[in-house]
Amino acid sequence: MLKILIPTDGSPHALLAVHHALRLVGAGLKARFVVANVQESATLYELVVAHDPDVLQKVSEGAGRDLVRPAMGLLAAAAQQVEADVSSGDPAQMLVEAVERHACDAVIMSTRGGGLRAAVLGSVSQEMVQISPVPVTLVKPPADADD
């Protein structure tokens, strides 16, 4: 059974990757899923202002768990095995580490997120194509999707 990493930033565009994965499952693919979110590392200002770095870590983890919830809910509702992976740091590098940590066989991800994150997720998807040790499937939004 394949294990597939699905990165998400919580946007509707990112959920397109989940819908694609579910179409593959509907066509007979047997898979388990890891939904991943990578939070930005704390800035120097945040580290100085927050007197307790553990608080920043908990806030970051909580935000990441909130952002993976919609994707995990869709997969769970379709009776798929799914787990979450939340980390912080360089997005593409952390996603590659998640692939390795969970022994994933493939990645399915959207070519862009929503709103201001659109350019960031787009560049992450291109970097993943270059550095991922496993195949990466990019899911483009429909041509008529709102930006």
Image (tube, helix red, strand yellow):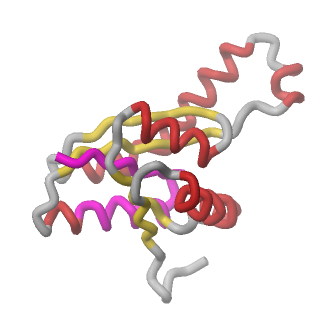
Quarter of the image for residue 138 reads: bottom left
* Percent x, y of residue 106: 35, 53
The residue located at (14%, 65%) in the rendering is 26
Q: Is residue 10 above or below residue 55?
A: below
| In the image, farthest residue toward the left | 28
Q: Is residue 61 above or below residue 127?
A: above
**Which residue occupies the foreground of this view, 94 or 61?**
94
Can residue 65 be seen? no
* Residue in view at x 50 percent, y 44 percent: 67
Residue 6 included in the magenta stretch of the image: yes
Tell me the residue at 38%/48% (across/down). 5
Quadrant the C terminus occupies: bottom right
Furthest toward the bottom, the residue is 144
Magenta-colored span: 1-22
Image-based side of 113 in relation to 138, left or right: right
Look at the image and tell me whether residue 58 can be seen. Answer: yes
Q: Position of residue 36 (x, y in %)?
A: 46, 42
The percent position of residue 40, horizontal first and vertical second, equals 69, 39
In the picture provided, is 126 more to the left or to the right than 132? Answer: right
Q: Residue 128: which quarter of the image?
A: bottom right
